Image (cartoon, rainbow, N blue to C red):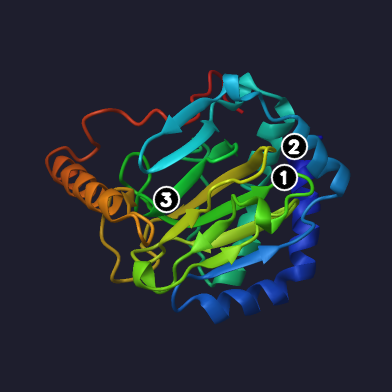
Amino acid sequence: MNRKEIADLIVAKLEREESSMRDCYVRSKDKIGMFTVDDLLPEELAHRLYVSFPDRSAMKLRKSLRESKYIAVQMNQYSPILEEAIFAFQDPRVVSIVSRVCENDQLLPDESLYAGGISLMANEQFLNPHLDNSHDKDRNRWRVFNLLYYVTPDWKVEDGGNLELWPDGMSGDPLTIHSKFNRLAVMATHQGSWHSVSPVKSRSNRCCISNYYFSNSPLKETDRFHVTSFRGRPGQRFRDFILKGDRMIRMLVRGLFRKGVVENKHVYRKSTPQ
């Protein structure tokens, strides 16, 4: 299938669910706006995407106090169906529906897949609470929405690897969003959208297809530029101390060097136009 055919399926599903999507987003937008859509694609296609994921050895491992996961963004190195699915979420019709649901007509998809692409988390891997980088790679546009599509069959909530939202910050309790098979989760990104991924407890791989929408304006008037900012979980006092210091240092660097000292390589470098 090509990206238009996959987008046709996504559009049909989102149009059927648009009212419930909007209700969910409106109820949550005062803190961290979000909504989910279950059974997004035909089950056979969702399963095909899962089995098309590359082996971990073909992906990049990111491992630190902040996170532990495998990522990939140079999509022409992997199964073509994965690239087609990723870019189906950038179809103007899909963007238009999300725009209506979230009442934001400035949404812009990102063909460079900055910080997007595919990710895989194996047993004991995690993503600590964090705020996403506020901007795109060139620091021109604001990151305003994350689209996370989960494709691991039979994934149970007790398997871990679930999206966690912290609507009251690190002083409150997280809201768990089950990363179940064939579910799309859409969340707003702004100065208060702390989120994380709980440690994986399963021997299976938790696989996710990610897109980010950007805008020329921030989602909230109070938003300010920030680097990706990690915190320790409740009870991780030493890690929290280290991660807050890490953020301060990286913010100082970005104050001196607008785009950072080292080029961010998590972008899709296409050899030929698509």
Residue 158 appears in the figure: yes
Camera-side residue of 204 and 224:
204
Question: What's the residue type where badge 1 is placed?
Answer: Val
Q: Position of residue 104 (x, y in %)?
A: 50, 68
* Quarter-of-image position of residue 168: bottom left
Q: Which element type, helix, strand or loop, lies under badge 2?
A: helix
**Which quarter shows the C terminus?**
top right
Mark 3–mark 1 distance (CA, rounded to whole Å): 21 Å
Q: Which residue is mark 1?
A: 151
Q: Which residue is mark 3?
A: 128
- In contact (CB < 8 Å): disc 1 and disc 2: yes
Q: Is residue 20 above or below residue 87?
A: below
N-terminal label among 3 and 2? 2
Q: Residues within 10 Å of mark 3 (few under 14, many from 20)?
A: many
Q: Which element type, helix, strand or loop, lies under badge 1?
A: loop
Question: What's the residue type where badge 3 is placed?
Answer: Asn
N-terminal label among 3 and 1? 3
Mark 3–mark 2 distance (CA, rounded to whole Å): 24 Å
For the point 49% across and 75% down, the residue is: 29
Q: Residues within 10 Å of mark 2 (few under 14, many from 20)?
A: many
For the point 60% across and 27% down, the residue is: 75
Residue 2 appears in the figure: no
Between marks 3 and 2 in the image, the one whose residue lies nearer the viewer: 3
Q: Position of residue 160 (x, y in %)?
A: 61, 52
